[in-house]
Amino acid sequence: MLWLWLILACVVAAVGVPPIVAAWEAWSTRATTADVGFWTLARSVAGSCHVPWGRRGWPIVRFPLRFGEARVRVLRTPGRPGRTLEVRGYQQRSFGFSARICSPPAPPARWHAPGLAPVLLEAAGGLELSFCSLEATDDRLLRWLLRHPETRRTIDGLQLASNADAVEIILAGRVILLRASTTAAGPPGALVEGMAPELIEALRLLSDDLHDLACALEDAGEPMTLSILCRGCGARLGDDPWHCPKCGHALHRGCREMTGGCANPACEAAPDALPAVIA
Ligand SMILES: [Zn+2]
Ligand SMILES: [Zn+2]
């Protein structure tokens, strides 16, 4: 009787396993094809592509900036359908303030850096941004950043140029964060290929300018000692800062919400921390 069961098991295995293997191969190939855009982007910016292992997630593209490094990733838009492309620059030097620029205009964020307040640019001075709302902890420094027409044009047109439903730019001490959200369907790789180049161009522009600002602030004798200053906004830390459980860096609690996690690129608790294995 046992041999009969054995033959039956062999027949089932012979008939059943190949389709399962074929289906698995088809699925895994499709998943790889969907991610090709990450590698294409990595090549175009002379960067590297890092694949998370052991947890769900899409690859993270990392590339150098003139004065720092940048990472690109895709995530599900929190609280809404669709996906968000996140381009994050980690600057070598702190530019000492925090700001939030939203296009189309958005109400102030619930959690933000202390002192972050709406900024209205005077249309008469030609500084107006038509499609953005602005908030900053230091409107003087934000105005300085936006003094070049090219910068204003780039920021004002970023939502349209990147084909995003909404763009949010967060400047936070040493972090420049560009988030573009879309409800358009399609694989994340295609999203990266289609939207990232415009955001990266804007990031490079902001990164160079904010590095100049950081140097000017240091020359002017602004205190830049990171042990007493928040890494999110450059202001002094209050009584009850958030301390990163992994690296110990301190941030205001609101700044932590704005940047989405630890602002130290080398920390494993950073929102786009790179996996140990490099692909
Ligand atoms: Zn802060
Ligand atoms: Zn950390």
Image (spheres, helix red, strand yellow):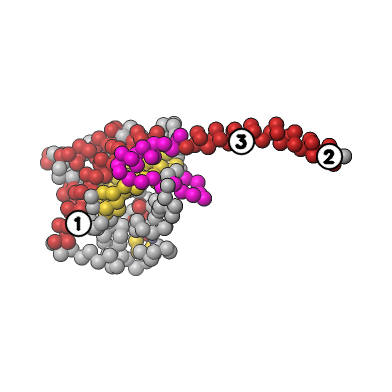
On the image, the x and y values in percent for residue 80 come to 45, 40
From the viewer's perspective, is residue 274 above or below residue 225?
Answer: above
Observer-side mark, 3 or 2, equals 2
On the image, the x and y values in percent for residue 172 come to 29, 54
Q: Report the quarter where the N terminus lies.
A: top right
Element at label 3: helix
Q: Determine whether label 1 and label 3 are within 8 Å by CB.
A: no
The residue carrying mark 1 is 214
Question: In front: 250, or 208?
Answer: 208
Q: Determine whether label 1 and label 2 are within 8 Å by CB.
A: no
- Residue 139 visible in image: no
220 sits left or right of 250 in the view: left
The residue carrying mark 3 is 21
Observer-side mark, 1 or 3, equals 3
267 sits left or right of 138 in the view: right
On the image, the x and y values in percent for residue 109 come to 35, 48
From the viewer's perspective, is residue 33 above or below residue 247?
Answer: above
Crowd class of label 1 (few under 14; some 14 to 19; many from 20; radius 10 Å): many
Question: In front: 175, or 54?
Answer: 54
Ligand 2 lies in which image quarter? bottom left
On the image, the x and y values in percent for residue 21 come to 61, 36
Q: Residue at left 83%, top 39%? A: 3
Give the residues drawn in magenta, as a range.
33-57
The residue carrying mark 2 is 3
Crowd class of label 3 (few under 14; some 14 to 19; many from 20; radius 10 Å): few
Q: Residue at left 35%, top 56%? A: 265
Please state the total of marks drawn on the protein image: 3
Q: Residue at left 15%, top 57%? A: 216
From the viewer's perspective, is residue 147 above or below residue 17?
Answer: below
